[in-house]
Amino acid sequence: MEITIDNLIFFSNFDSGNLAKVEKCRSNPNNSNVNEFNVWTSPDCANTIYENDYSSWFYFGIRGSVSDSILKINIINMNKQVKLYSQGMAPFVKVIPELPTWKRISDPVSYKMEDNKFTLSFQYKLLHQSEGATYFAFCYPYSYSECQEKLDYLERHYSSNNNPCRLETNDIYFYRELLCYSTGKLRVDLLTVTSCYGAVDDRECSPTGLFPDKNRPRCYKFKEKKVFFISGRVHPGETPSSYVFNGFLNFLLRRDDARAIALRKYFVFKLIPMLNPDGVEMGHYRTDARGINLNRMYLNPDNRLHPSIFAARTILEYYHREYTESSMDKFGAYPPKIVTTENVNFRSHQIKNHYCNFYQSSGITKSSSKDSSSSVSSKSHSRHNTHSASNGSTNKVKRRSLKRPSYESGVAFYVDLHGHASKRGCFLYGNALEAREDRIQNLLFAKLMSINCSHFEFDSCNFSERNMRIRDRKDGLSKEGSGRVAIHKILGITHSYTIECNYNCGRLISDFPSISKPIGTLLPYTCAEYEEIGEAVAVSALDIINANPLSLIGRSKFHSLNGVIAWTVNYEKQSTKRFIPKKSR
């Protein structure tokens, strides 16, 4: 889209751009130095049979200038975002080449609801420039092409490390693969990051219909490790998730950080940077090129209609089985088994090769409470174990049951990254689990996140059954089809989360690292804060297996992992009704 009005050129003909229409408003005699324009954004899938009502993402540029004039922009057709902008949210701006870094507009922003339509208004004084452009966006953009450029660079940088069997055990193994193509024929990449410890001179298999580049061999296998899976941008407008993802990935690739070295030794990290590259490139807010909310398709994905979701679920099922036996040799009951009584006692037992201690207490075990892996009814169980065939013909093939206790799964963590408009802060969504030790595991990970990052808000986390079933207002689809809920139900894993980051700011800043009382001035998030959330996800996984050589827990009021577990056990006991599924009470 490119529109010329007077001396200004409005355009959005670039990756992730979104601009539909521009009109110049009548001049106001009282503000002769203000040039005012009404701007419309394109809803997802605009001008197609799949067009829908999602219309919050905007991203456009302006070339040219008007002497001694202030530009006023009214974005006419956004989705209702009163809560977000009432909390201080402002559009983002950068100027090429003078101010190439994105920042929030400093002038006051106004908004109004009129005829059930939300209008956002802001002003900005254009710099005088003969070349270059000024860009405006809903939030920090991160385009498909930016993602590909980063992956291209990393692939070149680590190209000499393709055979881990020939390298030192602490060397970094980074491997990029084409997992599948999107419906728009864009790359959906799968990254593997780990150390060369445990490398096996054998490669992973290629499930039918996936990994279409047959000239590139699959990545190597590893023993004595479990898989940590993380994905982002299933909702294309939720750009904070890409910065969280980059923070996580950059941390893993630190060569000399003792924590990153430990993480690479214990886990094989499988990462999908963009699950919805079509939506990202097209400048959509929530859906793909066919107007589908892909984060509701995990229970029954179709390899033709939802190829990235079909691929993500398929490889998770593969890792669930493939890494089971070798991982159990190393980790025993992983994640660390927590069983509880009124008097919480902890004992440590040494794991093979003395890599880490896992803490236990004594008392209630899973035998006294239904295992969360058996919590699905037989009717829904049969539904969860069918999905689209890979041959593109029709459809569903029945899978054998994948259910097993969480500690027997080859997948240790499933984490999906998102942005959030209405609820302030950075927090996570977990699942309502029947076994008490599983509930404590979920709470423990969230609590560790709050210790490791001052921007993470434990009190905003949600583990309710309602949040596993609630239906979207616009399309009526249930969260039961989301990655977080579906992967837990399909594989039975405990650590299945959605990480949510507000577009603007949080509710409080914790007294890092003592996390006692909120202090400090509340500031809007920058890319750095989002990246710190990604680092905290990684570090907290290391803390929960008590293998963090530089843990912050000792500097907190809890003093040790034992102390955090004791606090979590007590918190769960006092909040039981909030976390237990109704049928288990």
Image (cartoon, rainbow, N blue to C red):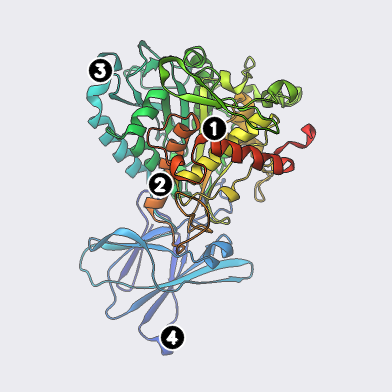
Residue tagged 1: 305
The three-letter code of the residue at mark 2 reads Glu
- Report helix, strand or loop for mark 1: loop
First-in-chain label (3 vs 1): 3
State the mark number for residue 350.
none
Q: Residue extending furthest bottom?
A: 30
First-in-chain label (2 vs 1): 1
Q: How far apart are marks 2 and 1 (CA)?
A: 34 Å
Q: How far apart are marks 4 and 1 (CA)?
A: 50 Å
**165 over 444 or under it: above or below:** above
The residue that appears at 47% across and 36% down in the rendered structure is: 231
Between marks 3 and 4 in the image, the one whose residue lies nearer the viewer: 3
The three-letter code of the residue at mark 3 reads Leu
- Report helix, strand or loop for mark 2: helix
Residue tagged 2: 532
Please say if the residues under marks 4 and 1 sit with CB atoms less than 8 Å apart.
no
* Whether residue 180 is visible: no
Label 3 CA crowd tier, 10 Å (few <14, some 14–19, many 20+)? some
The residue that appears at 74% across and 42% down in the rendered structure is: 577
State the mark number for residue 167.
3
